[in-house]
Amino acid sequence: MKTTKDYINLLDKVKSLHRLERAIEVVGIIFDFYQQKCNEKLNYTDEYFVVVGGLSLEFWTDSDYMTKDIDIIITENQIMNEVLGLLKFVKVDSRHWYHEELDLAIEFLTGPYAGNYESVKKFETELGFTFRVNSVKEIFIDRVRSILYFNTDDVPWLIQLAINFEMDIDYLVSACKTSKEKEFIADFFNKLQNMQQEDLQSKINTYRELYVSI
């Protein structure tokens, strides 16, 4: 069983890594420590520890999308507070923590995970730690809602996900909560499909041009 000092030493070890690699290893370290504390105090493992938000999008887009924020779904707030404090993160408010040397911010939300948990992907880091990350299709739905309800400029990321991954449109539509979301997804894929494949390939790295056409 690792001690708090062991986990701090591991964080020191990953400070020099590239930002995305560093964030991934930090999540794995936090997850391992958090589960150890859950087992010590509550004799159970939190199955709903899932990385969501910007880091999950960055994970699947190989850093095309960039973020310093790590958003995590958890069940045990008090234990996560304890873990982050022991790992020398500084508390910003009730849900946000920041580690200056790692240059990473953590936000955790109380679970359970709202999407289809069966679609969550398990990932193993280079140091051998594991964690769960939001699936591409759940990220797609989250970004659709961000566009519709918060007026974000996330269409380029929808395009990149749709190009790089096989999307289950029937699943996406079935997961929608409103007719507005269903109509947006249907219209999005209809317009994407109508584009000439040759034109699509030529613009694969210029998502702003595609954004204008959609």
Image (spheres, rainbow, N blue to C red):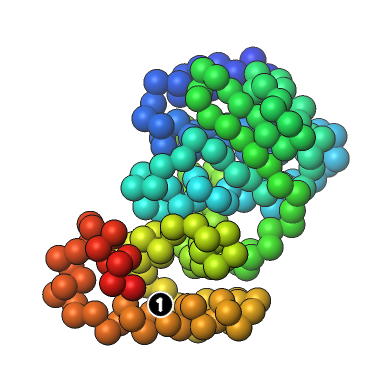
Query: Does any portion of residue 135 appear in the rendered image?
Result: no
Q: Nearer the viewer, residue 83 or 140?
A: 140
Query: Does any portion of residue 115 appear in the rendered image?
Result: yes
Question: Compared to 100, does 74 lie above or below?
Answer: below
Residue at the spot of label 1? 188
Q: Quick one: quadrant of the N terminus? A: top right
Give SS at disc 1. Answer: helix
The answer to whether residue 101 is left or right of residue 113 is left
Q: Quick one: quadrant of the C terminus? A: bottom left
Residue 96 position, x and y percent, is 68, 34
Residue 185 position, x and y percent, is 47, 78
State the residue at coordinates (72%, 37%). Answer: 95
Q: Nearer the viewer, residue 186 or 35?
A: 186
Q: Nearer the viewer, residue 213 or 100?
A: 213
What crowding class fits label 1: few (fewer than 14 Cα within 10 Å), some (14-19), or many (20 or more)? some
State the residue at coordinates (57%, 51%). Answer: 52
Q: Residue 31 lies in what quarter of the image?
A: top right
Residue kind at label 1, given as amino acid type = Phe
Question: Compared to 21, does 211 lie above or below?
Answer: below
